[in-house]
Amino acid sequence: MAGIKIIGLGKSQGDKVVTNDDLAQIVDTSDQWVRAKTGIKSRYFAENKTNEDMAFEAASQAIENAGIDRKEIAMCIVCTFTPDDYTPAVACNVAGRLGLLEQIQAYDINGACSGFIYGCNLANGLLACQQEKYALVIGSEKISPLMDMTDRGTCVLFGDGAGAAVLKYDPAADFVFYAGCAANKEILYCSRQDKAIKMAGQEVYRFAVSKVPECIKAVLDEAGYTDKEIDHFVCHQANERIIDNAARRISKDTDKFFKNLYDYGNTSAASIPIALCEMEEQGLLHAGSKLVCTGFGAGLTYGCMLVTFCPGSGASG
Ligand code: UT7
């Protein structure tokens, strides 16, 4: 159970707000359909920002909120399936712009929409092995260039953004991780050849409503907690109906399931850290908040973690 806690959060988003009505000018859709089927009202597209720009902005805010000396950060992990270039990794460029030490490890990982959960678990293991204190984990996606704007089944769903967390290793901290990969490359993918996201929406939906509650239950069981002992459940922000379905199955207190997909759409690996950052900004998080975060997406991957929020606890040890 020993592991990391979150001590600082940050976020960024694309520079252009795109509403459902804006998309209805391009494809045969409507604000009413998109809201009813997903909950999404608008999303951001990064027209004048790169993935790296958004990752840098989110990370800068997270480091400031953590109140640590950035030279103590031992690793920079960017979770993304939409890097600006094949190489170098977004993480290397961000580490350089942030002025992190040269003697760190910096790389991208691709766990699709489960990426941030996988990144946190990776950081947890590495910090423990290497006896280091701090990791920077960023979920950052620029999905808009990979959207087929003639496919109304997908182009209304996604948005661009980044969320970041500074993690501190603490042997006394609660951390539980559960994950899986139901290997499948047919129902959700984006090939190098097509450069456009393809999705069988109903099949992904069925996968999600089965896996999200399964993951949460597994983590609660392993941690020995009931839902009542968890302050917030933070699910991948893809579809309001998927989150509501999981909420009904897990807890009587469905308000514990935070949602902000209304304004962001699905930002893949960025959705959970953006949600966490918004929760903090809205005063929903306090020192010691117990969080269960769950992602699912292409792969098909799924992952869930129990983690504690301890804001700005860098300096205090
Ligand atoms: O991070 C990746 C995770 N991905 C997800 O979580 C996606 C999970 N899946 C979903 O959220 C839902 O499947 C969608 C929101 C994508 C679609 O909802 P649905 O209830 O599964 O709709 P559908 O695909 O079965 O389509 C129903 C109808 C079809 O029309 P017909 O054949 O019944 O005449 C579609 O052509 O809705 C039509 N449709 C649309 N209509 C207006 C599909 N997209 C749109 C649209 N606007 N944007």
Image: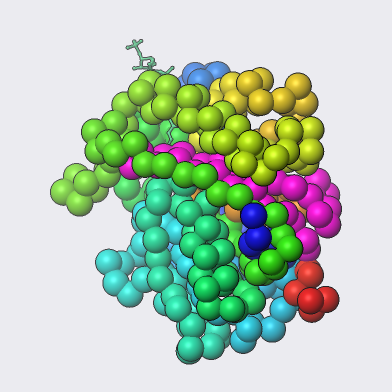
Callout count: 0
Of all residues, the one furthest to the bottom in this rendering is: 102
Q: Position of residue 277 (x, y in %)?
A: 68, 54
Main secondary structure type of the part rendered in magenta:
strand
Q: Is residue 261 visible?
A: no
Quadrant for the C terminus, please. Answer: bottom right
Q: Position of residue 154 (x, y in %)?
A: 37, 32
Decide which of 181, 257 is in the foreground and name it. 181
When asked about the image quadrant of residue 124, the answer is bottom right
| 241 falls in the magenta region | no
When asked about the image quadrant of residue 184, the answer is top left
| Above/below status of 255 relative to 193 | above
Decide which of 246, 161 is in the foreground and name it. 246
Quadrant for the N terminus, please. Answer: bottom right
| 305 falls in the magenta region | yes
Residue extent of the magenta highlight: 282-311
Q: Is residue 193 left or right of residue 78?
A: left
Q: Position of residue 137 (x, y in %)?
A: 55, 64
- Rendered-image quarter of ligand 1: top left
Q: Position of residue 246 (x, y in %)?
A: 60, 26
Q: Residue at x 75, y 74 (%)?
A: 314
Q: Residue at x 79, y 38 (%)?
A: 229
Q: Residue at x 52, y 51 (%)?
A: 117
Q: Residue at x 55, y 49 (%)?
A: 177
Q: Is residue 290 visible?
A: yes
Decide which of 304, 33 is in the foreground and name it. 304
